[in-house]
Amino acid sequence: MTIPLIDRLAAVRHDWTLAEVETLFALPFADLLFQAQRVHRAHFDPNRVQVSTLLSIKTGGCPEDCAYCPQSVRYDTGVEREALMPVAAVAEAAARAKAAGATRFCMGAAWRSPKDRDLGNVIEMIRVVRELGLESCATLGMLSASQAAALATAGLDYYNHNLDTSPEFYAEVITTRTYQDRLDTLGHVRDAGMKVCCGGILGMGESGRDRAGLLLTLATMPTHPESVPINQLVQVAGTPLAGVEAVAPLDFVRTIAVARLTMPRSHVRLSAGRESMSDELQALCFLAGANSIFYGEKLLTTTNPDIERDRSLFAALGLLAEERAEVTAELGSVP
Ligand code: SAM
Ligand code: DTB
Ligand code: SF4
C-alpha cells in the first residue's frame, strides 16, 4: 500500500512528482501551514533565523537579458556601470555587516560569468570576509568546473546561482543562457564541495504550475540546496517586467510552505521584496517555514527594510538571529 503524502512529509525525499507538489500547493491554507510547521519544527528551532547581508561588488553593465534585472546593459534603469570594488571597501562593508549582526556576507557581481583575471580579486575578498569570522557567499554568474574548484579552495562557503523559475517559463524571462547552463554551474559548485544557494523569483507572470516546477526541480536534486532563496520580484522601471501583476501574497506564503515541505533541511530564505511586505505577511512567511533573510538596507541595487525595522520585527515575533555555523573553528587554516 502506498503511504499517503501527508504521512511521508517528515522524511527528506528526492523523488517528488509534479502531481505531489501541486497537491501540496492546493491544500487548504491552514492544513498547508500546519504541515509546514510540523516539518520545520522537526528540523529547526522555529524561532531562529539565519541572517545574511548582500553587497554588490560589481554593479551594472551586465550583457545578459534577464527581464527582471536592473543591472542588464539592455535596459534603461538608471543603474550606472561600476568597476569591481576594491578589496578594502569590501572588507569595510563586511565589518559593518558583522557589527550589525549578520553571520553571512554575500557578494554579487553583474557578470554573465567571471573572467579568470577577476577571480584573484574575488578570492582575496573571500579571504577578508572569512577572516572577520563571517560565512562567505558569492554570486558571480556561470562558473566552469575549474573556477568552482578555485573558489572552493579559497574557502568560499556558499555559491548562489538561481534557477529563477520553471524550465518551461525560463525562456520567457532570459534568452541569453539556458536552464541547462544554470544546472551545469550548479553541478560544478556541488562537485567542488561548496554549499549551494539556489532559488527563484515569484511575480514574473509565471503560473502556479511554474512555481511548482521550480520547487520540483530543486527538490529532486540529488542533494537539496542548503539555502533556497524565494524572491518576490522587485519591479524596477525600465525592465521588461516592470508593471507585471504582482504575486498574490497568500500564494507567496504557499510557495514558502511548499519549499519547506519538499526540502525539509534547507534554509528557506524570505529574500528580495520584503520592503513592500507588511510585518504580518512576513510573519506568515516565517510560520510557513522561512528561516533566513537578507539583512541591511540594501539588496544589490534596490532597497531592503532598514535594520531598525527588522530589529523591531524580530522583537515582536520573538525571533533570534541564528548563530553562525562551523566556520570559526576552521579560520586558522585560511591561507
Ligand atoms: N549575475 C549573476 C547571476 O545572474 O547569476 C549574479 C547576480 S544576479 C543579480 C542574482 C540573482 O538576483 C538573480 O538570479 C535573480 O534571482 C535575483 N534578482 C535580480 N534582480 C531581481 C529583482 N528585480 N527582483 C528579485 N530578484 C532579483
Ligand atoms: C537572491 O536570491 N536574491 C538576491 C541574491 N540572491 C543575490 C538578489 C536580489 C536582487 C534584487 C534586485 C537588486 O537589488 O538589484
Ligand atoms: Fe546579469 Fe545576473 Fe542581472 Fe541577469 S540577473 S542581468 S546575469 S546581473
Image (cartoon, grey):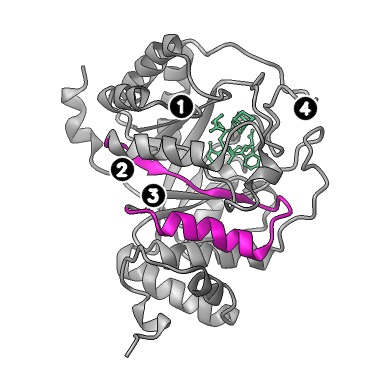
Q: Which residue is mark 3?
A: 225
> Which element type, helix, strand or loop, lies under badge 3?
loop
Q: Are marks 2 and 4 in contact (CB under 8 Å)?
A: no
Mark 3 vs mark 2: which is more N-terminal? 3
| Separation of marks 1 and 2 at Cα, in angstroms | 16 Å
Is residue 78 toward the left or the right of residue 98 in the image?
Answer: right
Q: Residue at x 67, y 27 (%)?
A: 71
Mark before the other along the chain sequence, 1 or 3: 1
What amino acid type is highlighted by mark number 3?
A: Pro
Quarter assignment of residue 30: bottom right
User: Which residue, given by chain and number where applicable, does mark 1 sit on?
Assistant: 96
Q: Position of residue 187 (x, y in %)?
A: 37, 39
The one of 171 and 269 positioned closer to us in this rendering: 171
CA separation in Å, label 1 and label 3: 28 Å
Instruction: Calculate the distance from the C-alpha at mark 3 to the C-alpha at mark 2.
Output: 18 Å
Q: Which residues are magenta?
A: 193-222
Residue 75 disc label: 4
Q: What is the three-letter code of the residue carrying label 1? A: Arg
Check disc 4 and report its element: helix, strand or loop.
loop
C-alpha span from label 4 to label 1: 32 Å
The answer to whether residue 101 is seen in the rendering is: no
Residue 185 position (above or below residue 316): above
Q: CA distance from mark 3 to mark 4?
A: 31 Å
Q: Which mark is residue 324?
A: 2
